[in-house]
């Protein structure tokens, strides 16, 4: 989650929720915990009073850097010995699976409306 926040500092809670594909209420609970831990701050959007913008605090930036380094090391370890060609195949199949899941979700919403 911190990765999404850091890439989009100043983004609205709604944009963040959409970015990680969770409901707004779920994002709010996550952000509440991050704010309580001193990792983020929230402020009203000066251009849209309904929107809340999210920023990392200095402690949040430090925590993000530490977590990012660990994640990068774990990522590299997972892909050790796997060729670039095989990595591309995995990416392509994962993207296709994701599109299939998106399609199922869209189909359910259409059925619920009917």
Image (tube, grey):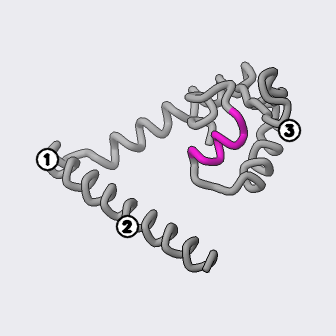
Q: Quadrant of the N terminus?
A: top right
Q: Point out the tag, 2 or 3, that comes first from the N-terminus.
A: 3
Q: Which residue is mark 1?
A: 85
Q: Which residue is mark 3?
A: 36
Q: Which residue is mark 2?
A: 100
Mark 3 crowdedness (10 Å alpha carbons): few <14, some 14-19, many ≥20: few
Q: Quadrant of the C terminus?
A: bottom right
- The residue under the point 72% across, 40% down is 13
Could you tell me residue 30's position as x and y percent?
75, 48
Q: Which mark is residue 30?
A: none
Where disc 2 sits, the SS reads: helix
- The residue under the point 58% across, 53% down is 21
Q: Point out the tag, 2 or 1, that comes first from the N-terminus.
A: 1
Closest to the observer, 98 or 88: 98
Q: Mark 3 and mark 2 in contact (Cβ < 8 Å)?
A: no
Residue 89 lies, with reference to residue 72, above or below; the image says: below
């Amino acid at each position: 989650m911190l990765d999404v926040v850091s890439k989009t500092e100043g983004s609205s809670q709604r944009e963040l929720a959409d970015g990680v594909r969770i409901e707004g209420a779920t994002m709010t609970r996550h952000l509440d915990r991050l704010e309580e831990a001193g990792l983020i701050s929230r402020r009203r959007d000066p251009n849209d009073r309904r929107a809340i913008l999210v920023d990392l605090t200095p402690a949040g930036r430090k925590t993000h850097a530490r977590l990012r380094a660990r994640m990068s090391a774990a990522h590299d370890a997972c892909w050790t010995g796997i060729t670039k060609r095989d990595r591309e195949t995995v990416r392509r199949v994962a993207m296709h699976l994701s599109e299939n899941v998106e399609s199922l979700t869209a189909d359910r919403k259409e059925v619920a409306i009917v």
